[in-house]
């Protein structure tokens, strides 16, 4: 029953206007019912007892059967004339993905608590949401402090990437802020990429005070490699409380080298953003998500086949059965 329903659900009709003729079938059935109930010629008898006891043989009981066969013949004939068709289709999806390297600052200042619970955890939460919105892209993670290293290479296995992001914490690298090294390591992750669009999203809350590579020189390399760099300055204005396990707590002033971050973005055709709270940080990643949309091309192929033959065969079978019932079994002469 389910397969029959699925078959009928998949049908379309090339001559849909013919289906209006199906309305004649209930009209014919109503006409036949009216004709049988209209007054007939009467015969006066002394008693109807003999007629009441007479139930009639099988020919009497099935005398209307040919009429219903005729209705079925008409119904399936109309359906055949409407040209039922089944459709088979398949879709080719061409995804033009984007390779994205996330460069995340994990220096001590990222433990500042102006973002709840701190800057690093707030950034990880927002980046996790960003990754979830880009299922078709290869994304990698680079972390940097006094030096930089690849936490997760470019991958479409986003669960592995999310696991690497979740386990990222302060203290896995010596403290400092090597923006140039972080950018250079992210460039190396994208150097062999064949993607048409290559992007680095670099987040920092400080000034470049460590590492070996000059950030603007790294930006020039990124430009030559066709890599766009979006930079984000993270942190509120003024002082912020910093609490580092096993070290202690204190206050630091926001020192973000906005001129440097803006210069890196401009050099590579990207854009600089300033996020002074977590909500603004979410907006920044949403803006980047909108600017760097993955292009998906779909090509749909449809193949239609005529399905009128089964309906025509059923109509012919009902017609032959009506003829057999009428002229052979009931022996009604035309």
Image: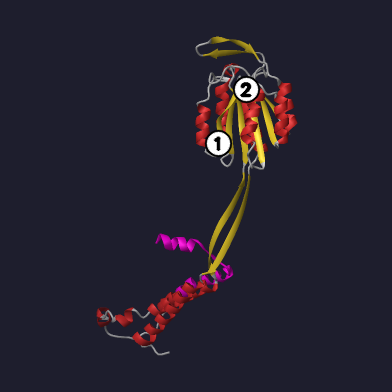
- Select label 2 or label 1 by which is in front: 1
In terms of image quadrants, where is residue 254?
top right
* Residue with the most extreme front position: 212
Name the residue: 29% across, 85% down.
45
Q: Secondary structure at mark 2?
A: loop
- Colouring scheme applied when the structure was drawn: secondary structure
Q: Quadrant of the N terminus?
A: bottom left
Q: Is residue 296 left or right of residue 333?
A: right
> What is the x, y in percent for residue 181?
64, 25
Q: Secondary structure at mark 1?
A: helix
Is residue 70 visible to us here? Answer: yes
Q: Which residues are magenta?
A: 1-29
- From the image, tell me which residue sits under label 1: 132
Question: Which dot marks residue 275?
Answer: none
Q: Is residue 213 left or right of residue 316?
A: right
Q: Is residue 291 above or below residue 27?
A: above
Q: CA distance from mark 2 to mark 1?
A: 21 Å
- From the image, tell me which residue sits under label 2: 277
Chief secondary structure of the magenta span?
A: helix
> What is the x, y in percent for residue 54?
26, 81
Residue 189 in magenta stretch: no
The residue nearer to you, when weighing 252 against 98, is: 98
Residue 24 in magenta stretch: yes
> What is the x, y in percent for residue 26?
47, 71
Which comes before the other along the chain, label 2 or label 1? 1
In terms of image quadrants, where is residue 250?
top right
Q: Is residue 314 above or below residue 255?
A: below
Name the residue: 71% across, 29% down.
219
């Amino acid at each position: 029953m389910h397969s029959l329903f699925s078959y009928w659900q998949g049908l379309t009709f090339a001559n849909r206007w013919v289906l209006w003729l199906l309305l004649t079938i209930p009209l014919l059935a109503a006409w036949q019912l009216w004709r049988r109930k209209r007054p007939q010629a009467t015969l006066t008898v002394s008693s109807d007892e003999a007629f009441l006891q007479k139930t009639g043989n099988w020919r009497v009981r099935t005398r209307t059967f040919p009429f219903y066969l005729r209705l079925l013949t008409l119904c399936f004939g109309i359906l055949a004339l409407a040209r039922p068709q089944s459709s088979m289709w398949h879709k080719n999806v061409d995804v033009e993905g984007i390779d994205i390297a996330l460069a995340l600052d994990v220096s001590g200042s990222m433990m500042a608590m102006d973002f709840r619970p701190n800057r690093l955890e707030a950034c990880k939460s927002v980046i996790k949401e960003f990754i979830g919105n880009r299922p078709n892209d290869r994304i990698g993670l680079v972390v940097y402090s006094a030096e930089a290293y690849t936490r997760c290479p470019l991958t479409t296995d986003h669960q592995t990437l999310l696991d690497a992001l979740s386990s990222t914490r302060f203290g896995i690298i010596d403290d400092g802020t090597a923006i140039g090294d972080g950018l250079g390591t992210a460039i190396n992750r994208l150097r062999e990429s064949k993607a048409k669009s290559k992007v680095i999203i670099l987040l920092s809350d400080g000034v470049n005070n460590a590492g070996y590579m000059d950030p603007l020189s790294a930006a020039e390399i990124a430009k030559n490699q066709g890599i766009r760099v979006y930079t984000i300055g993270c942190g509120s204005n003024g002082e912020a409380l910093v609490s580092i396990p096993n070290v202690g707590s204190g206050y630091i002033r926001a020192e973000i080298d906005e001129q440097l971050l803006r210069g890196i973005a401009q050099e590579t055709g990207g854009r600089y953003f300033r996020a002074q709270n977590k909500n603004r940080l979410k907006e920044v990643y949403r803006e980047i998500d909108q600017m760097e949309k993955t292009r998906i091309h779909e090509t749909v192929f449809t193949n239609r086949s005529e399905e009128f033959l089964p309906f025509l065969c059923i109509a012919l079978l009902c017609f032959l059965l009506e003829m057999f019932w009428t002229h052979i079994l009931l022996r009604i002469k035309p």
